[in-house]
């Protein structure tokens, strides 16, 4: 892909699943990668693996709900890896208390989910924007979910938080396009992984996903990483403000 080699990208939630798949794909393209995760151990493991392939990578133990920690993290990225050219916001949570009819969901679950999934996306973008503008422009890829697009019934708080990420992507595209920042949103369907995607990596989850989409299988973190890398790359230079379902076709049903 064009425009990735030698450039610096920051991935939140980079220690696991889709974020990890994105870091790995960017490193294969020759990018410099900052792996940010609340779980510092996971971020370190991923960054170490990337460094073993000869790629410049750093790990950042940081919670995306903490603005000052994110500001410090972005400063470290620029100081150690050079001008920031792109951001992927993959950090997210799913509270098990959210798998209920709305009237049975606590305000704590609702607010806690919004704080990380929507608030954390907002803060990561807010803190990265000055560095992206300073670099002369760049690209942002937000990660929402098909839960933002369809009423498939799993998690009112989660669905609302991801709907917010879609809306945030659109307003951001309008506000920052002319300033050289491209912004797009990926809505993954069922993706197998080691964290939130663990259920879809199981036999039960895998066969559920297979029934729910026309490709008849779960997605892989690597496939989502490839889409994120494409949207960051110069190959996507005229792709802006788009909400892209990467779900094996589940959303056509
Ligand atoms: N896996 C799926 O099927 C699926 C489907 C649709 C959308 N998504 C979305 O994709 C994104 C990644 O999902 P995944 O399956 O890779 O999940 P994951 O659990 O494997 O990875 C998420 C990572 O985010 C980190 N994280 C959580 N809260 C954080 C915080 N406050 N600050 C910093 N890091 C934090 C976790 O430590 C974890 O390493 C999420 O936003 C999720 O909602 C996933």
Image (cartoon, rainbow, N blue to C red):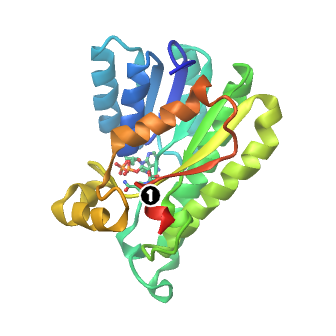
Disc 1 element = loop
Residue 244: percent from left, percent from top: 56, 50
In this view, the residue farthest toward the left is: 203
**Residue 226 falls in which quadrant of the image?**
top left
Is residue 104 rendered to the left or right of residue 237?
Answer: left
Residue drawn at 41 percent across, 14 percent down: 56
Residue 142: percent from left, percent from top: 57, 45
In this view, the residue farthest toward the front is: 214
Residue drawn at 73 percent across, 45 percent down: 172
Residue 232: percent from left, percent from top: 57, 30
Residue 73 visible in the picture: yes
Q: Nearer the viewer, residue 216 or 163?
A: 216
Residue 101: percent from left, percent from top: 45, 85
Residue drawn at 43 percent across, 19 percent down: 29
In this view, the residue farthest toward the bottom is: 103
Q: Which of 23 and 40 is in front in this view?
A: 23
Please, is residue 215 above or below residue 16 in the view?
A: below
**Residue 48 falls in which quadrant of the image?**
top left
Is residue 100 rendered to the left or right of residue 194?
Answer: right
Q: Which of 206 and 108 is in front in this view?
A: 206
Q: Nearer the viewer, residue 217 or 49?
A: 217
Please, is residue 178 above or below residue 85 in the view?
A: below
Is residue 42 rendered to the left or right of residue 61?
Answer: left
Residue at mark 1 = 249
Residue 39 visible in the picture: no
Please, is residue 219 above or below residue 183 in the view?
A: below
């Amino acid at each position: 892909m064009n425009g990735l080699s030698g450039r610096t990208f920051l991935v939140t939630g980079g220690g696991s699943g889709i974020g990890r798949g994105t870091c790995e794909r960017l490193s294969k393209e020759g990018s410099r990668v900052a792996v940010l995760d609340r779980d510092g151990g996971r971020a370190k493991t991923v960054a170490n693996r990337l460094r073993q392939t000869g790629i410049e990578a750093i790990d950042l133990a940081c919670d995306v709900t903490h603005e000052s920690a994110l500001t410090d993290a972005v400063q470290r990225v620029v100081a150690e890896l050079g001008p920031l050219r792109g951001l992927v916001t993959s950090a997210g949570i799913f509270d098990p208390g959210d798998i209920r009819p709305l009237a049975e969901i606590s305000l704590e679950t609702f607010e806690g989910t919004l704080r990380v999934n929507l608030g954390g996306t907002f803060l990561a973008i807010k803190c990265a924007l000055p560095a992206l503008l300073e670099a002369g422009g760049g690209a942002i890829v937000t990660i929402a979910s098909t839960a933002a697009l369809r009423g498939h019934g799993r998690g009112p708080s989660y669905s609302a938080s991801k709907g917010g990420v879609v809306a945030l992507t659109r307003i951001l595209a309008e506000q920052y396009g002319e300033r050289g920042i491209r912004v797009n949103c990926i809505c993954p369907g069922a993706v197998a992984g080691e964290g939130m995607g663990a259920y879809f990596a199981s036999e039960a989850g895998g066969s559920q996903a297979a029934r729910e989409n026309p490709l008849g299988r779960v997605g892989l973190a690597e496939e989502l990483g490839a889409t994120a890398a494409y949207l960051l790359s110069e190959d996507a230079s005229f792709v802006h403000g788009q909400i892209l379902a990467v779900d094996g076709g589940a959303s056509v049903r």
